[in-house]
Amino acid sequence: MINKLLDNITKYEGTKFMKLAGEGMDDITPVSDLKSLEVPAIYVHVPFCHKLCPFCCFNRYLFKEDLARAYFLALKKELDMYAAKGFNFSDVYIGGGTPTILMDELESLIAYLRKLYDIKRVSVETTPPAMTQENIDRLKSSGVNRVSVGIQSFDDKVLEAMGRTITTGDDARQALIRSQGQFDTVNCDFIFNFPYQPIETFISDVKTFKELKIDQATFYPLMPSPRKKTAMEKKFAKVDFTREEKFYKILLDELKNDGYTVSTVWCFSRGDHMIDEYIVDSPDYVGAGAGSVGLVNGNFYVNAFAVENYIKKIDQDKFPIIRYRNLSEREHIYYYFLTKLFGMQVNKEQFKKDFGKNIDVRLFKELAAMKLYGLLTEDKENVWVTDKGMFSVSIMMRNFFASLNTLREHCINNKL
Ligand code: SF4
């Protein structure tokens, strides 16, 4: 019952949160009005892929070399704009799309980031075919600390059903074997609760990950945008969210109860490792590149999605922000609370520092209800997510990202 309630509340709140201002006012640049900030994290998006996987809700387009090279140039100009405002970043997360699609441009981008900012850690997303020995060496030479390889499943039938034709399960395995031990952290991404995905193959995927002794795995529940959901339901069966808990239980049994560190409710590591979810550690973060999302000083914003539109705005020396929302205090606190729960704990002192109020007072009802149902526990310093609460937080986070995917779909379809 409590999960149903949290499901409904977060669906409603997520939809409200994603109603952004700026319709017809695309020269609004809320970031430019801010004082210089020491924001630790920047996310940089590279929206090109060799093939487009049908289930994917990210902002991605078929690779065209000329356009991609013009895009990397525009990205550097956007980074200049943040540097000119006095921003500095220690952690950079380069995602996509496929950031490794043009290795020379990626190397040059990382070097440029280092020139502008005091970068300490670099994380790069990629695909199994890109993890050749040559590319591994080049990423290492660029000082990349963490690679995140999109696997989704090792099962060829599941991959085929997903339309993920860029790799086979065996190629994915070999790419991980080649990469493991070459970086501070190797992560692999999986999906669960895809309409055609037997529970048994998911168990086998988790076991293979363990056998390969990869540093880390992140398991994303299916969180389709409305169109993708309809398309999947036409092709397969109804998207069935009631199956989700069975999949999640496997993660608890096979990973949490087998000594893996819970880095987020979706991410399990052998020991301590850098994670992809900068939203957990960095309450403020900048999003650069087409379709990126940022949160700075209470402003949640998105960049232009269409690559041509993005480049055009940069060429006009404007921040490419097309929509934003100045969060109310309540929205900001809810967002903060959710992202911290996603990372398994909320530090009470830090909450007070960030919002000037005690969490026990500000979120009294929420904490009381979640503790009553055994989802949270607390000590003097922290509020903790319990084993039982992990699935509840997974539902809440899935709804938040599903709302974001709905916004993405709207922006992509309207070529914003
Ligand atoms: S899943 Fe990865 S490779 Fe496939 S389209 Fe999306 S970003 Fe590109």
Image: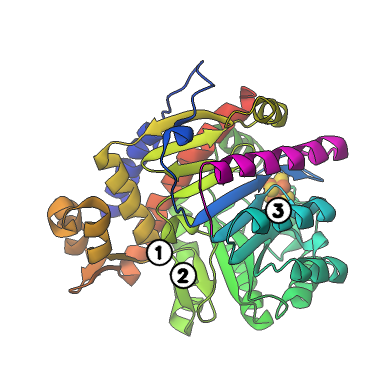
Q: Which mark is residue 263?
A: 2
Are the residues flagged by discs 2 and 1 in contact, CB closer than 8 Å? Answer: yes
Find the magenta span and give its range: 62-89
Provide the residue designation for mark 3. Answer: 112
Magenta stretch: dominant secondary structure: helix
Q: Which mark is residue 343?
A: 1
In three-dimensional space, the C-alpha distance between marks 3 and 2, rounded to whole angstroms, equals: 30 Å
Rendered position, 391 above or below 78 = below
Q: Is residue 397 magenta?
A: no
Q: Does residue 152 appear in this view?
A: no
Rendered position, 169 above or below 302 = below
The image position of residue 263, as x and y in percent, is 46, 70
293 and 285: which one is in front? 285
9 and 324: which one is in front? 324
In three-dimensional space, the C-alpha distance between marks 2 and 1, rounded to whole angstroms, equals: 6 Å
| Residue at 54% over, 70% down | 274
Q: Is residue 83 magenta?
A: yes
Please, what secondary structure does the residue beneath circle 2 have? strand
Q: Is residue 369 left or right of 193 when viewed as pictured?
A: left
Q: Residue furthest top?
A: 24
**3 or 2: tag closer to the N-terminus:** 3
**Circle 2 crowding by C-alpha within 10 Å: few under 14, some 14–19, many from 20:** many
Q: How is the image coloured?
A: rainbow
